[in-house]
Image: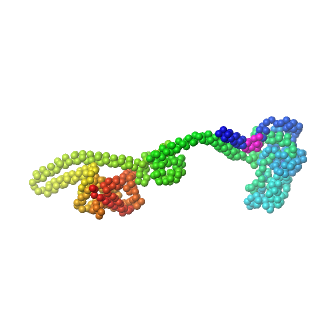
Amino acid sequence: MKLKILTLIVTFIMMFGLFFNQLIHLEYDVSIFEYIYYSLPPSEDDLEYLQAKSKLIYGGNISEPPLGIMESESGQYMGLVVDYMNAISIQLGVPILSKPMVWNDALEALSQKKTDLCDMVPSVSRSEFYDFSNPLYDLKGALVVKAGTEEEGLAEAIGGKTIAVQKGDYSIEVIRSRYPLVDIVETDNVGDALVLLQNDEVQAVLGDEPVIWYYLNELSVLNQFVFINESVYDQSCSIAVPKGEKELLRSVNRAIFELRKNGTLDKINQKWSGYSLLLNRNTDTEKLKVGIFMITALLGIFLSLIMYGNMKLKSLVQFKTRELQFAFDSLKNFMIVIDENKLITNVNLALVNYLSVRKESLLGKHTYEIDLLNRAMMALANDSNCEFQCEGRLYQVKFEHERMLLISDITYDKIKEQQMIHSNRMEAIGQLASGVAHELRNPLGVIRNSTFLLNDMVTDSDPVVVKSINAINSSVLRASRIIDNLLKFSRFDGVESAEINVIPIIEEILEYFRTTNKNEHISFELICEPSLIFRTNEHSLRHVIINLVSNACDALKGAGEVKITCDLHEEGGIQITVSDNGIGIEPSHLSRLFDPFYTTKAPGEGTGLGLYIVYTELKKINGAIKVESAPECGSTFIITLKEAV
């Protein structure tokens, strides 16, 4: 245990050291060890060496703007590298005299120790004569051709061409190592090379990118030339010293480090901002990448320590999880755990058994892939009471702890609730009907008795009087029948089977619908034998016929015909057919027509329990039902009843 933790700590320290070293290198172009070394005071040998030097000579290119150039009018040698040298001089405490010369001569003077310093790109061949400091600036080699020359890449631009290059330039080494057969014309400076290209004496010019840019701007011929996109080289430039001058090299490195650290080099770059962008890489992106990688790695190690330290706790948690899963699977309701993307992470055994699938096949699926869960999520999003239907069942869904769905089958609860509401409603209607009968039959009796007396008192045979008395009697009888029908319609309390005449029951029901639909153009027709005695439960039969006739009236939309036929069934019992010529039923709805809460009516126009109640009531009285329908062709419901024992 302790050994593993110690290993992680050592790994952490090593990685931190590597990341810190990379950041130091990006910022100061030194390693972490060089950073520590140059941050310490110089050694006595280095101090003695500098004290012995009365001056240092920098041999720079006389015509390499913006790095260095001799101004003809003022006679001053100036440029970006010249400013670097002046800053190094101040840091060393030793004067550095700039001695401009032709580049090839500058290289020879340094190798012969006639000068002390010169800036250049390090190479294998040059390392035979010079030692190099840490990087001071970056330099790219660029190839220029005349405008209108169609060149796609470096190889095409160089191959078979005559190229002008400054004598002693680093790019000559690069070109000859890659393209040994290229024809090179050497010039004293880049400006002369561009003149040769302008006069078509060469086909391209190769040189340091900032120098070429400077000459093209000064000569105002920038639009006459184009740069090949691919660089010939991209290297760091250092301060070269004569071979073996170790004390001088250490002092120069220390000076460059201090100038980077105190921001002097940045200030010089700002002075030459037009060209310093071509000479200094932007390391911000690399620093950011290293920082992010470092933080990520450190977090990884930190998390590893935490994970390792919590292994026993994890084992305990797994044990408790198994216990919770057992309790989870014991629940009868459907339990589903989802993540923030609505992907299933766990389900209980009740849902697995309901869907008849393996649990593993559900894990990782989105809720929309499973119809039951998709409907549940839509109910949560759109319905405040969170109830939904699926495959003829009614469910209630709710969230527990934001990630757990609890789905309960409330089909039977809802049916019982609806049946209780219906029963209470029928009871209320029965009480109302009894009250109406009591209140209306008394005045109807007075009217009836009065007309009886009037009939005895009338001695003449005035047809108008006789007709009026008969009309009053007829209206009283009609009102009495309406009250009787209302009472019979509301009296659903029969539970025993009995011998009943089916025809009067159906006629009473149709009379009720004729009365309630008198403002609509619906006709009702009954085709049956005058007397059809059958033993069954009158309450259930009334309930079935009322629901079917009510549905038929709804399908007619206020106009049409409802027809009921009654016949003896060939296998015994009777067959009752209720048909209409209404809107009909889509074939896709027929298989679910008798499911509870399934309805094609608009919200608020039906509960979806009517045909379900028909189906269940028929089951009670040993009956069956089937339907024949098509869109715009009406519907026919066929009931077959076997006589009760």
- Residue 602: percent from the left, percent from the top? 39, 53
Asked if the stretch drawn in magenta spans residue 28, the answer is yes
Q: Is residue 457 left or right of residue 228?
A: left
Position of the N terminus, as image quadrant, is: top right
- Residue 465: percent from the left, percent from the top? 14, 54
Q: In this view, does 87 lie to the left or right of 626?
A: right
Q: How many marks?
A: 0
Q: Nearer the viewer, residue 395 or 487?
A: 395
Asked where in the image residue 97 lies, by quadrant, the reply is top right
Position of the C terminus, as image quadrant, is: bottom left
Q: In this view, does 517 lie above or below 37?
A: below
Asked if residue 547 can be seen in this view, the reply is no
| Scheme of colours in the image | rainbow
Q: Which of 502 and 325 is in front in this view?
A: 325
Q: In this view, does 479 lie to the left or right of 120?
A: left
Q: What stretch is highlighted in magenta?
A: 21-33
Asked where in the image residue 47 lies, by quadrant, the reply is top right
- Residue drawn at point x = 37 percent, y = 51 percent: 607
Q: Is residue 494 above or below residue 634?
A: above
Of all residues shown, which one is farthest toward the left?
A: 459
Q: Which of 521 and 331 is in front in this view?
A: 331
- Residue drawn at point x = 42 percent, y = 48 percent: 409
Asked if the stretch drawn in magenta spans residue 528, the answer is no
The secondary structure making up most of the magenta span is helix
- Residue drawn at point x = 87 percent, y = 41 percent: 56
- Residue drawn at point x = 43 percent, y = 46 percent: 385
- Residue 154: percent from the left, percent from the top? 76, 58
Asked if residue 244 can be seen in this view, the reply is yes
